[in-house]
Amino acid sequence: MAFLYLTTIGWKSGRPHEIEIWFVERGSMYYVVSEMGRASHWVQNIIRNPMVSVKEQADGRSNRKSHLHMSRRIQTSHN
């Protein structure tokens, strides 16, 4: 099983914050879901500073690391 390690910059502290999150990769895009929507701290960090780092890791080995700019609007879905 692979995980994505997403590092954001704290909007209050200015310090890096890394979370482990499940993801789906399609083409060159990563898709992640926030259980708490926009209320999640990591989502709030991205809204205020869209520069993030991601690292994909499977079986304890890091496959790749990228620095990304979250240029697309964060979308929420409501059932």
Image (tube, grey):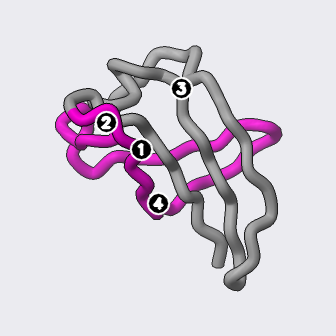
Mark 2 to mark 4: distance in Å? 17 Å
Q: Is residue 70 visible?
A: yes
- Mark 2 residue type: Gly
Q: Do the numbered discs 2 and 3 sit on residues whose CB atoms are within 8 Å?
A: no
Determine whether 66 is above or below 22 in the image: above
Q: Position of residue 9 (x, y in %)?
A: 40, 35
Q: Which residue is mark 2?
A: 10
Instruction: Tell me the number on the disc at residue 30.
Output: none
Q: Which callout, 3 or 1, points to the residue nearer the camera? A: 1
Confirm whether the magenta stretch covers residue 17: yes
Dividing the image into 4 quarters, which one contains the C terminus?
Answer: top left
Q: Which residue is mark 4?
A: 21
- Mark 3 residue type: Met
- Mark 1 residue type: Pro
Q: Is residue 78 visible?
A: no
Crowding near the residue tagged with mark 2, few <14, some 14–19, many ≥20 C-alpha atoms within 10 Å: some
Mark 3 to mark 1: distance in Å? 11 Å
Q: Which residues are magenta?
A: 13-42
Q: Do the numbered discs 2 and 1 sit on residues whose CB atoms are within 8 Å?
A: yes
Mark 2 to mark 3: distance in Å? 11 Å
Crowding near the residue tagged with mark 3, few <14, some 14–19, many ≥20 C-alpha atoms within 10 Å: some
- Earlier along the polypeptide chain: callout 2 or callout 3? 2
Instruction: Tell me the number on the disc at residue 16.
Output: 1
Q: Position of residue 67 (x, y in %)?
A: 68, 35
Task: In the displayed orientation, state which residue is furthest to the bottom.
Answer: 59
- Earlier along the polypeptide chain: callout 2 or callout 4? 2
User: In the rendered image, which quarter is residue 63 located in?
Assistant: bottom right
Q: Which residue is mark 3?
A: 51
